[in-house]
Image: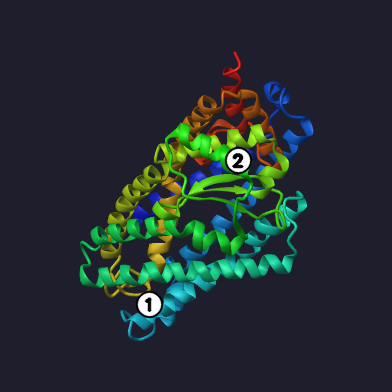
Amino acid sequence: MGRVWWLLLTLGLSLIFLLLFAVLEQRPLEVEALRYFPAELLERGRTFAREVRIAASLQALASLGLLLFLCFSPPGARLLARLEGVEGTGWRSLLRVVLGLFLLTSLVELPFSFYLGHLHEKAYGLTRQAAGDWLVEHLVNLGVSLALQLLLWLPCYWLIRRSPRRWWLPATALTAGFSAVMVALYPVLILPLEHPVRPVRDPQVLAMIQRLADQAGVEVEAVAELQVSPKSNRLNAMVTGLGPTKQVILYNTLRQQMTPAEVEVVLAHELSHAAHGDLVRSWLLSATTGAVGLALAAWLLRAMQEVGPLYLPAPHAARGLALLLLFFSLFDSITAPIHNYQSRQMEVRADAFALRLTQNPRAMVTSFQKLAGANPSDPSPPAVVEFLSHSHPSILRRIRRAMEGTR
């Protein structure tokens, strides 16, 4: 059993340090990148990405360190036993452990979250929020996260209690269904907590989207604008939601900073995701990897019974939640490159789709240039960083493909 945990830990930590060392490497600016971006912007993007990777790596290590302490050290096991209480396998025990673990991880991650979500964004002029406003928003997000965790873990532990060996099968259906519900609710429940969402009234934008949707063969139920400008300077657009909640959403900063032709290219790209069912494809991959993870988790819980220092009396003992959190933290980091590869393939197809719809490669290139300026990142990251951790191809790679359309 110890070998399994060592293998998981070795793979998870190897990815963290591989990505960290790759972004720390000093590299000369690419001549090709200098054709499209000033040297100052390239250096700014690299520095921004390097600082984010350092902070995110430290956050991941701190979180893993906490879970390792709780699961594999006698003091940590005693703390979990106190949270669990004498009943051990009751619902009150589970609630105490869920709340205790949530509080501990939130406190450990708070300094990194504050740096990444506020201080770092402020230093680069990407946010207008005051520190107090950020903290209030962060606490609201934590409250939503806690509610969602309870909605997921309580029925999962009921399944573990009912069938300690095969609980992962119905749990796969449960988590997949839960994920689909969250995708459907995202534009109507989660997004409005972060920024006001308002219907787009501009007839020119509505006509543009309808024309693109007709060309793409996509039904557009609604078009909304996310009012991010009071808080942020970032640019983005998306097609999100499922069924009756599916809608096109664009940041209001997009229309403020981009020309109509650039907005058209961005929206055509997003409509590709709807035309090709990319949300469903991503959901299917998540459900598949989730099933593998849950099957391994079920085996680990059984194998860890009466193994020190936790000494689980049964797979559904409340203290086993810490083991599950540790396992899924490692499993998710190990399988993330698979999800990122699928996402990059979808983005490549969406760029090609947008070019076919708009026939405007120049607007695509200038939109990429503005996106790079408003959303700092390394336009040409090391190949290993892009392969393992990027959900989108690098900006330079996307520009290169768009420029092929001008020849």
In the image: residue 179, left or right of residue 110:
left
x and y percentages locating residue 14 in the rendered image: 49, 45
For the residue labelled by badge 2, is the local secondary structure a helix, a strand or a loop? helix
Instruction: Looking at the image, tell me whether mark 1 or mark 2 is earlier in sequence order.
Output: 2
Q: Residue at x 58, y 66 (%)?
A: 108
Task: Quote the CA–CA distance across marks 1 and 2.
Answer: 39 Å
| Along the line of sight, the residue nearer the viewer: 386 or 403 | 403
Q: Is residue 110 above or below residue 21?
A: below
The residue indicated by pointer 2 is: 21
The residue indicated by pointer 1 is: 94
x and y percentages locating residue 325 in the rendered image: 42, 63
**Amino acid bearing label 1:** Leu
In the image: residue 92, left or right of residue 202:
left
Q: Is residue 238 above or below residue 198?
A: above
x and y percentages locating residue 396 in the rendered image: 62, 28
x and y percentages locating residue 254 in the rendered image: 66, 44
Q: Residue at x 58, y 64 (%)?
A: 193
Q: Is residue 383 above or below residue 245?
A: above
State which mark lies toward you, 1 or 2: 1
